[in-house]
Image (cartoon, grey):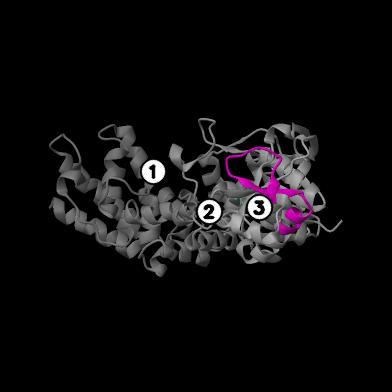
Amino acid sequence: MNVKTRIAPSPTGRFHIGTARTALFNYLYAKKTGGCFCIRIEDTDKERSKVEYETEILEGLAWLGLEADEFVRQSERAPRHAELLQRLIDEGKAYISDELSHERAFDTIDRPRRDMNKVMNLRTQVIRLKNPGKEITFRDEIRGDITFDTTELGDFVIARSISDPLYHFAVVVDDMDMGITHVIRGEDHISNTPRQILIQGALGAPRPIYAHLPLILNEKRAKMSKRSGDTVAIMDYRAEGLLPEAFNNYLALLGWNPGDEREYFTLPELCEAFSLERVQRSGGVWNREKLLSVNQHWMREMDDAMFAKEVHGMGDFDIDSIHKVVSLLKERAHTFKEAHDMLEADLRCLFEEPALDRTALVKKEPVDRAGLTKIALSELKAHITSLADDATADDAKSALMPYADAEEEKGKGGRGAVLWPLRYALSGQERSPDPFTLIALLGKGDTLRRIDAALALLS
Ligand code: GLU
């Protein structure tokens, strides 16, 4: 069988993590089986569909790298929907009725066409499918056999008029015409499936293979939703500086398990490893920490130039300065936004001369602290002078720690009385990287100049 899957988002809201995961699983399954992945924008709900949502969804899918082999806009298929609605009416498989009426028997199916058109224009008229009222069992690849008694659905509405089909009808016609073999979608669509199978029956359409994915739950085990205060729009995560690689990796593991302990997958690796059998039935619980750690992994995998460019894109830091601290940022940041915020806060001192405050420099009591601080800084200065120009943080640490340790032994102010003024002299900040890292990043010349500036405050 030539597999063909689709993601069929309705552009009635922002690009949601649930849609992204459904798209991913459809993409993975298609690629795994050498099949075709399609995007179909389901914009038949004219009131709620918005161009900006469609744009966001398409941008989001492109950002994730889920490229489609085929693209369809449902509204462009309106003539085809109308044709098949008409056919069902002509064949007596559907009929026009009052919106509120649930009765099967209705005389409109026997009416001449010209009357029917008139009836169609009345807002209270709808088109209903004649429901044979039987039990329907379908196989779900994830949940096994599911049975529904469809009698209680009655003759349900499939269109508001010949030119206004409802979701169930349009989805079935499009899946049929596009030759969709696998319908992989959220489990909130399970209850829609019997209706769609009945429509397939009326149209003589083949039944696709169904796979309903578990919901994405928030930490309170409720469905992730904007209303519960959850961040559900993919583009908000993108703005925060998450990588598409991380998103695909994380979303894949939210509902699917690879069967081993492996945590990190590229998109091609996911295509290789994916199988519907390993999709779990229970809801996947969103875990932001996990997402961030996966993101950190993929950030670290990036080459430094790309990494610096991403951080640069978050604000106005100059790219060469960012370059100098890439390894530090890779060590600490989980998102590019976080990396940028570090440059604004803890790492600011690397780009700007610190404005030192004497009280902060000598820190606390006792009174002779200024004297001790001066001695400490002078001593450190001597050690730093003898460092090589390209000394690393480790080199600086090995050169300076023995002195700090010796002070600790003496017990006067301990290591802190040595390391605090050094770190403060170099950064002018309460919080910053450790002094050895600062020395390595500032370079020997700047380091010594900043120490001199601090000493000048004490004389
Ligand atoms: N348009 C539907 C939605 O956005 C999806 C339809 C389907 O996957 O069958 O929920």
Residue occupying the point 51% across, 57% down: 49
Q: Earlier in the sequence, mark 1 or mark 3?
A: 3
Q: In the image, which is nearer the foreground, mark 2 or mark 1?
A: 2
Tell me which residue sits at (47%, 55%) in the image: 241
Tell which of 72 and 262 is nearer to you. 72
Is residue 42 left or right of 235 when viewed as pictured? right
Look at label 1 and name its amino acid: Pro
What x and y, as percent, mark residue 350? 33, 59
Amino acid on which the number 2 mark rests in the picture: Phe
Q: Does any atom of ligand 1 lie closer than 8 Å to the CB of label 1?
A: no
Instruction: Find disc 3 in the rendering and name its residue.
Output: 24
Residue depicted at 15% across the width and 34% down the height = 366
Residue 174 visible? The answer is no
3D distance between C-alphas at marks 2 and 3: 13 Å
Q: Nearer the viewer, mark 2 or mark 3?
A: 2
Kind of residue at badge 3: Leu
In the rendered image of this protein, does residue 424 appear above or below residue 79?
above
Identify the secondary structure beneath mark 2: loop
On whether residue 75 falls in the magenta region, the answer is no
Quarter of the figure that contains the N terminus: bottom right
Residue extent of the magenta highlight: 86-108
Q: Nearer the viewer, mark 1 or mark 3?
A: 3
Q: Which of the two residues, 226 or 319, is positioned nearer the viewer here?
A: 226
Label 1, residues with CA under 10 Å away: few <14, some 14-19, many ≥20: few
Q: On the image, numbered disc 2 is attached to which residue?
A: 15
Name the mark on residue 402. 1
Q: Where does residue 369 sit, x and y in percent of width and height? A: 17, 40
**Looking at the rendering, which quadrant does residue 44 occupy?**
bottom right
Q: Secondary structure at mark 3?
A: helix
Please indicate, yes or no, whether residue 232 appears anywhere in the rendered image: yes
